[in-house]
Image: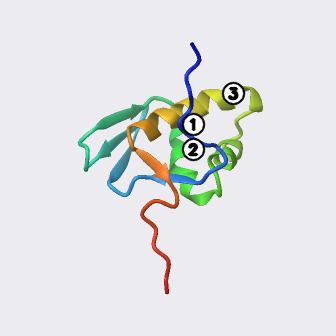
């Protein structure tokens, strides 16, 4: 059975404001202070993508900027979906305020 993605690659994403990312030799640790969940990123490429999400207009651009070929985009989209499901990453519009 194919997994349904919860991440829209054509939407902007960012780390949840309550998530800390700590680089490690194997990749990184993500800790969500709100939910107290801990996640391990075991691939330095996905770490770079996650760290750069807020700098790009959408997740697809962040993946492409990391040099990921089209044939591997689904693998990274699944990883981002897992992070979205655990609220480690959220849509970029979440928690933003506009100046009046």
**Nearest to the observer: residue 32 or residue 21:** 32
Q: CA distance from mark 1 to mark 3?
A: 12 Å
**Nearest to the observer: residue 28 or residue 9:** 9
Q: Please say if 22 is above or below 26.
A: below
Which residue does the image show at 51% across and 31% down from the upper left? Answer: 43
Q: Secondary structure at mark 1?
A: helix
Q: Are marks 1 and 3 in contact (CB under 8 Å)?
A: no
Residue 45: assigned label: 1
Residue 55, percent across and down? 59, 59
| Quarter of the figure with the N terminus | top right
**Left or right placement of residue 10 versus residue 95 in this view:** right
Q: Quadrant of residue 71?
A: top right
Q: Secondary structure at mark 3?
A: helix
Q: Which residue is label 3 attached to? A: 72
- The residue sitting at the bottom extreme is 100
- The residue sitting at the right extreme is 70
**Nearest to the observer: residue 9 or residue 39:** 9
Residue 49: assigned label: 2
Q: Are marks 2 and 1 in contact (CB under 8 Å)?
A: yes
Which residue does the image show at 56% across and 52% down from the upper left? Answer: 52
Residue 97, percent across and down? 45, 73
**Left or right placement of residue 46 versus residue 90 in this view:** right
């Amino acid at each position: 059975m194919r997994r349904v993605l919860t991440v829209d690659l054509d939407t902007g994403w960012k780390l949840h404001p309550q998530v800390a990312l700590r680089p490690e030799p194997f990749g990184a640790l993500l800790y969500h202070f709100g939910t107290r969940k801990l996640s391990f990123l075991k691939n330095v490429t996905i770490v770079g993508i996650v760290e750069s999400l807020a700098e790009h207009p959408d997740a697809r651009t962040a993946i492409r900027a990391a040099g990921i070929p089209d044939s591997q985009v689904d693998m990274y989209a699944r990883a981002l979906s897992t992070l979205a499901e655990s609220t480690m990453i959220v849509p970029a519009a979440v928690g933003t305020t506009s100046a009046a």
